[in-house]
Amino acid sequence: MQQHIDLKIVEKPEDAPNYNRDTFVRGLQIHQMVIVRRGTQGGRPTVDLCLRSQDGSEEFTTIVTTALLAQVAGIYRVCNEGEAGKADALDGLPAHMVRVFLELEELQEKVSALDRFISHSGFFANLEEDNPDEAVRLRRQLGLMVDYCDVLKKRLEAAKKGKNG
């Protein structure tokens, strides 16, 4: 069962390994995708990709964890946003650090949303009057989230310098 994969990001198909070469296997198609609700020993879902050769003579199945697919979706989102610097930052990172990168991306979005809510929301202004303890908790949550972002950034910086890979 495949749980992680080496990552390589290229700009164009011709930059990808084995494209336009005789050794590239062509003609395999995904003919079915099966979601197995409790596919791992721990009871987590898996995705079985059933592949078939173009002439139907051979069939293969690969089992992928949903965690890996979520990671691929996150990488795709980063690449699709068009920010080359972010996508380039992923290239060559070990799989566990790619997860850290994606976690940081998601966390930064949440920090921005909570900061906007606190800074620009009439609802939050009312909350400060009606329930000041909750307002304090939300501000504390924002501070902790910012601290967590800082830790993730430092881990990524260390990984890029070869100190944590």
Image (tube, rainbow, N blue to C red):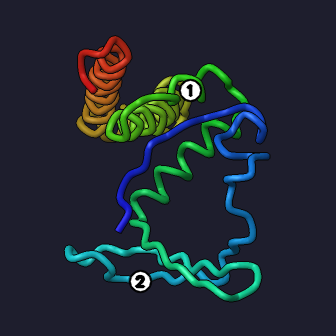
Residue 24 in view in this figure: yes
Expressed as whole percent of the image width and height from the top left, the position of residue 155 reads: 29, 22
Q: Residue at x 52, y 23 (%)?
A: 89
Please tell me which of labels 2 and 1 falls first in the chain: 2
Q: What number is the disc on residue 21? A: none
Image height of 5 relative to 115, above or below: below
Q: Amino acid at mark 2?
A: Val
The furthest residue to the front: 22
Image height of 57 relative to 165, above or below: below
The furthest residue to the bottom: 56
Q: Secondary structure at mark 1?
A: helix
Image height of 12 relative to 63, above or below: above
Expressed as whole percent of the image width and height from the top left, the position of residue 41 reads: 21, 77
Q: Amino acid at mark 1?
A: His
What residue sits right under mark 2 in the picture?
Answer: 36
In this view, the residue in front, 125 or 80, is 80
Q: Quadrant of the C terminus?
A: top left
